[in-house]
Image (cartoon, rainbow, N blue to C red):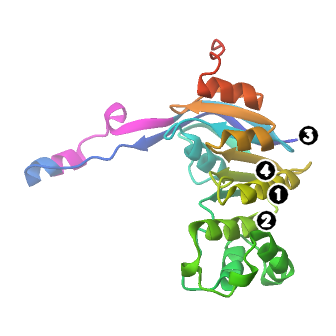
Amino acid sequence: MSTTVELDKVVLHFPRGRVYVGPVLQSLRNMFRPINRAEDTFTALKGMSFRAESGEVIGLVGRNGAGKSTLLRMIAGIYRPDEGTVRTAKHVLLLAGLGVGFSIHLSGRENIYLYGAMLGMTRTRIAELYDGIVEFAELREFIDQPLKTYSAGMRARLGFSIASEVVPDVLLLDETLSAGDAAFVEKSSARIKGMVNGARTVIVASHALELLHDVCTRAIFVEKGEIIADGPVRQITDYYMGVQPLPPRV
């Protein structure tokens, strides 16, 4: 196996929002005063280090605000670390909110071509995949209706069906596997399993623990911007849920 993602002591600081109130002069003073990192920033990622190999499906678990989505965006190159290094394979795809970029005024058919193009597919390639996308999404009878008539679940199914046809080196999923009804979740889980072969790595952040048990080969527990534990999926989710105590930190 080859390493497709490597983080080495990655630190990321975010600026704190600050509301300026009071006299105009005081507000201006506040705006132009020297930055004090301790007061004006918070640390979103705190020295994170891990490696992912081709063929792995890694689940990220942790409470809202723990840093999972920030970590995925760091790997995708949206954020640059303030400290440490991030190395990835060439083609990294982040799916965060399926169907972001859809137009509600266009039909499902038109949105397949629009979203596919946004994900880097040619029109010819989209045409080749079109029938399979529609069948997988189970939207044949609605495909020429405007997207504004679709339910949230229908839009998510269409988004996943298109996106899962892309072939990246590293696929990052942020709460996208839990979209749709139970039957579609099962189908999407099977599709993810099929996507993971010797040339792929998948990292998925989700609160759907049973889904992670089903699709992941490994899990990482993130809390307050730190990696708390990394190992077998059920063991890590047991730590996260408090079923068993965390191992001592080394």
Q: Which residue is mark 1?
A: 191
Q: Which quadrant: the C terminus?
A: top right
Looking at the rendered image, the disc whose residue lies closer to the viewer, 3 or 4, is: 3
Residue 244 image point, x, y percent:
65, 17
**Label 1 SS:** helix
Residue contact at pointers 2 and 4, CB within 8 angstroms: no
Q: Which residue is mark 2?
A: 166
- Tell me the magenta residue range: 28-44
Q: Which label belongs to residue 1?
A: 3
Distance Cα–Cα, label 3 vs label 4? 13 Å
Distance Cα–Cα, label 1 vs label 3? 22 Å
Q: Which label belongs to residue 89?
A: 4
Which corner quadrant of the image does residue 120 belong to?
Answer: bottom right
Is residue 153 highlighted in magenta? Answer: no
Q: How many marks?
A: 4
Q: Residue at x 66, y 14 (%)?
A: 247
Is 130 on the left or on the right of 108, as rendered?
Answer: right
Residue contact at pointers 1 and 3, CB within 8 angstroms: no
Q: Amino acid at mark 3?
A: Met
Few, some or many residues within 10 Å of mark 4 (<14, 14–19, 20+): some
Q: Nearer the viewer, residue 12 or 190?
A: 190
Q: Earlier in the sequence, mark 3 or mark 4?
A: 3
**Label 2 SS:** loop
Q: Is residue 76 above or below residue 14?
A: below
Distance Cα–Cα, label 1 vs label 4? 22 Å
Q: Is residue 162 above or below residue 202?
A: below
Q: Amino acid at mark 4?
A: Ala
Q: Earlier in the sequence, mark 1 or mark 2?
A: 2
